[in-house]
Amino acid sequence: MNSCDFEKIIEYRFEDRQLLEKALTHSSYCRENGLQSKDSNERLEFLGDAFFDAVISEELYKRLDKVDEGKLTKTRALIVCEKSLASIAQRLGVGDYLNMGKGEEQSGGRKRESILADALEAIVAAIYLDGGFDAMRSFVAREFSSAIDDALAGKLFADYKTQVQEVLQKRGKNTKIRYVTDREEGPDHDKTFYVHLVCDGITMGRGSGKTKKEAEQNAAKETLEGRYKK
């Protein structure tokens, strides 16, 4: 990995290059090379997720000064979803710079949305730890400016889980919606998840995906389209 090239792409120069290295290290690389799990980007991902939400919330709060909490929450959900994060990561070429195990790479890991989204969150955290909150906020605001614009214009990705919740909850205040995992198939580096959506004890839709989030979105989509048959 040429970290200098990547720093030019993200327009940020690290004082501590090890933070960038860790942000770009997938857990599969650690497993194949005898490293500890803490050497992967998973802990950074956890931290980055929180700061990313905070910055996007602040941007929406400033831009939408006449919008209530519910609309702000829905708009944020469109921007911070896995598909949105992965799209920005693809534009930045994150997949090309990841330290990744051979098995994961051979199964298409460098293009997998879940891996790209997680890596971008880890990068956000790495910038925060290296340069502070202002540096991290500048990166997020710049790279997600167009995504925010698209979300405000209704052009961003459909959040089927939010849509199905609104539709089903019109039935009454006590409507209960759950996503149940039926099974997982495949090795750890290439799993497929199968879930179904339950509303008031009735199965309404099923979905599958490479992550639970993706499977849940697909189950919600099938519910909205009324394609599920018992």
Image: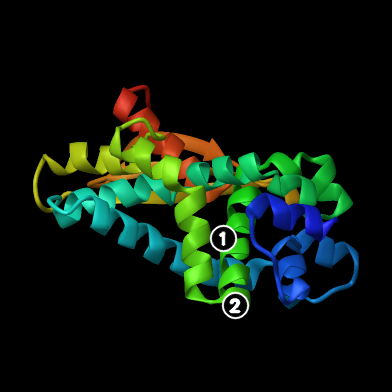
Q: Is residue 172 left or right of residue 86?
A: left
117 or 89: which is nearer to us? 89
Q: Which mark is residue 121?
A: 1
Q: Is residue 178 above or below residue 223?
A: below
Q: Which residue type carries mark 2?
A: Leu
Q: Is residue 133 above or below residue 24?
A: below
Q: Position of residue 42 (x, y in %)?
A: 64, 68
Would residue 197 be seen by someone viewing this image from the given angle? yes
**Quarter location, residue 148:** top left
Q: Secondary structure at mark 2?
A: helix
Q: Position of residue 111 (x, y in %)?
A: 70, 40
Q: Which mark is residue 129?
A: 2
Q: Along the polypeptide, which appears first: circle 2 or circle 1?
A: 1
Q: CA distance from mark 2 to mark 1?
A: 13 Å
Q: Which residue type carries mark 1?
A: Glu
Q: Position of residue 181 (x, y in %)?
A: 49, 50
Q: Secondary structure at mark 1?
A: helix
86 or 201: which is nearer to us? 86
Would residue 195 be seen by someone viewing this image from the given angle? no
Q: Position of residue 167 (x, y in %)?
A: 19, 36
Q: Is residue 93 left or right of residue 205?
A: right
Which class describes the residues within 10 Å of circle 2: few (<14), some (14-19), or many (20+)? Answer: some
Which residue: 43% across, 41% down?
147
Q: Residue farthest to the left?
A: 172
Q: Is residue 186 left or right of residue 51?
A: right
Which residue: 56% across, 73% down?
128
33 or 123: which is nearer to us? 123
Q: Is residue 230 left or right of residue 34?
A: left
Q: Which mark is residue 39?
A: none
